[in-house]
Image (tube, rainbow, N blue to C red):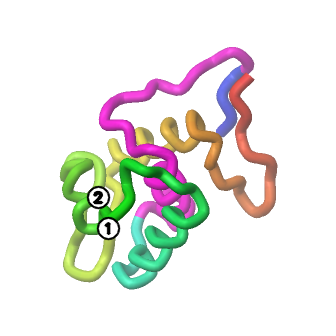
Amino acid sequence: MPLPRGARPRLDPPDPHLAGAAFLAWLAKQGGDEELSVCEYQWELSKKNHPTPKLDGVNLYEYVNSLGPELIVKRQKIIELTPRGSKWATNWAIAYNVVRGHHGADNPRIY
């Protein structure tokens, strides 16, 4: 849902950084959870498409652990955003302008 004109998302810490926000936007679009192998591929793709020096050499497990279990968790064979993590991830994706539109719709814009 786009923010009203002039509104800014609430950016609670931690900062996921650009590549992380792109990965989290993808994960949120998948419904908040996805198989581990698919997430590993997408993590590398997000780092390639959105170079972020702070995340160079950081693998998916390290990244998930750095964010904490209140936002994102690794279960047996999936990575899952928590309900709180879903809203947090969406706000950061909007701030970094990496939100993925729903079925080809325009991405929300910050005015």
Q: Is residue 42 above or below residue 62?
A: below
Counting labels gives: 2
Q: Quadrant of the N terminus?
A: top right
Mark 2 and mark 1 in contact (Cβ < 8 Å)?
yes
Q: Quadrant of the C terminus?
A: top right
Instruction: Classify mark 2: helix, strand or loop.
Output: helix
Q: Residue at x 63, y 18 (%)?
A: 7
Q: Position of residue 85 (x, y in %)?
A: 35, 46
Q: Which residue is mark 1?
A: 60
Q: Residue at x 32, y 32 (%)?
A: 13
| Position of residue 69 in the picture relative to residue 100 (left or right) | left
Query: Foreground residue, 77 or 41?
Result: 41
Measured in 3D between alpha carbons, the distance from the residue under mark 1 to the one under mark 2, in whole angstroms, is: 5 Å
Q: Which residue is mark 2?
A: 63
Q: Position of residue 88 (x, y in %)?
A: 41, 39
Q: Residue at x 62, y 48 (%)?
A: 98
Judged from this view, the residue extending furthest toward the top is: 6
Q: Is residue 64 magenta?
A: no
| Position of residue 27 in the picture relative to residue 66 (left or right) | right
Q: Position of residue 19 (x, y in %)?
A: 49, 54
Query: Foreground residue, 66 or 109?
Result: 66
Instruction: Classify mark 1: helix, strand or loop.
Output: helix
The quadrant holding residue 40 is: bottom left
Q: Position of residue 27 (x, y in %)?
A: 48, 62
Q: Is residue 36 above or below residue 33?
A: below
* Mark 2 Cα-neighbour bin, 10 Å: few <14, some 14–19, many ≥20: some
Look at label 2 and name its amino acid: Tyr
Residue 93, numbered label: none
Look at label 1 and name its amino acid: Leu
Q: Is residue 9 above or below residue 87?
A: above
Magenta residues? Answer: 5-32
